[in-house]
Structures are given as C-alpha cells and as structure tokens.
Image: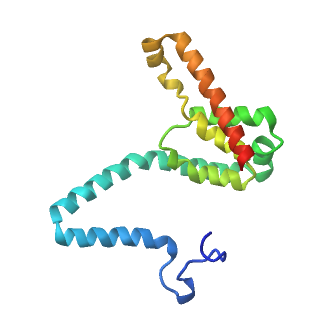
Amino acid sequence: MKGMGGTGKSAFSGRGLLSFRLLFPLAVVSLYAVLFMALPAKAASAAGISLRIFRIILIPMSLVFFLMLLMNHFLNAAWVTKSLGGGSGMRGLMFSSAAGIISFGPIYAWYPLLKDLKGRGATDMNIALFLASRGIKPFLFPLMISYFGITYVAVLTFFMLASSLAVAALLDRMV
C-alpha cells in the first residue's frame, strides 16, 4: 500500500497487530458501540440508515465484482493493452466511450474495475473517457426528448461526448 514507507505492508505488520485495512471498519464498529451505549435510539436509527445504504449499493457493487471476476477469467493484459492501451487508437476511444455510456450504478463502484484495467495496460485517456462519458444516459433519452425535443438532445449528446473526449485528452496530456 502506498504511503506506508514504500514497503506495501501494514503500518502494524511488524508487531503482528491489526492490518491497516481493518483500522477503518474497526473504528466504525467501535464508534457505533460507544454510540449505542450513550444514545441507543439515535445509534439504532443511524445503523438502520447505514444498512439501507448498504442494500442500495449492494447490487451495483456485486455487478462490478462479477464483471471483475469475468474480466480476470477472460481478459488478459495483452488484449487490454491492444484494446485500451497507447496504440488502441480510435477503436479504444470508442470502446471506452461506449462502456462509460452504458455503465450504471454509483461511480465509486467502478473504481476497482478501472484500477484493474489500468494495471492491465489501459491508458489514462481511456479511463478518463470512460468516467467522463458516464454523463450520457441513453435510457433518459425518451424523457429528455419529450421535454426538450430531439434536436436539443442530439446536440447536447454530441457536445457531452465531445467534451468528454476533450477532458480525457487534456487529462492524458497533464498526466
């Protein structure tokens, strides 16, 4: 893990204590335990809200982890590098845009998958294009057309896609 002296080990691994990754969940559980003792009704309400949020993100997170499982099984680094790497050209940009457009769920659910793709050779531009293209949602087109008309939606979609490409290219240059 970065920021841990470059060793990639836990801050406490030398002493055999808790793993660094367990500190946050342990802190949350400890905080809930203290709150349950001090303010049981409010703590129960907060725990209920946390559980509802967990249920909401469970399906998108499960989908992303399932996709990661499939990706690990079927994709190899050579294919990702060829399709999303530096030499992928227009095909890679179209693939990244299309994947961003059809993706759904909370954005943070996609971060592990994108990190894995980056590790397999995807370029910063393709990942940025995926993230920027998420603003285009085809399932909203009928509603948008009914409110604003087809010309407006077509022009808006074009400019959203063009700005996604511009942002991705700018980020690629800066990184």
The residue located at (53%, 89%) in the rendering is: 15
Instruction: Judge left or right: residue 68 versus residue 89.
Output: left
Q: Quadrant of the N terminus?
A: bottom right
Where residue 146 appears, as percent x and y from the top left, is 44, 12
Residue furthest right in the image:
87
Depicted 55 relative to depicted 98: above or below: below
Depicted 22 relative to depicted 122: above or below: below
When asked about the image quadrant of residue 99, the answer is top right
Where residue 79 appears, as percent x and y from the top left, is 78, 46
Instruction: Judge left or right: residue 144 versus residue 37.
Output: right
Q: How many marks?
A: 0
Instruction: Judge left or right: residue 9 versus residue 125.
Output: left
Q: How is the image coloured?
A: rainbow
The residue located at (46%, 13%) in the rendering is: 148
Depicted 92 relative to depicted 113: above or below: above
The residue located at (17%, 71%) in the rendering is: 38
The residue located at (55%, 10%) in the rendering is: 151
When asked about the image quadrant of residue 3, the answer is bottom right
Where residue 44 appears, as percent x and y from the top left, is 21, 60
In this orientation, which residue lies closer to the viewer: 145 or 53? Answer: 145
In this orientation, which residue lies closer to the viewer: 45 or 78? Answer: 45
Where residue 84 appears, as percent x and y from the top left, is 75, 43
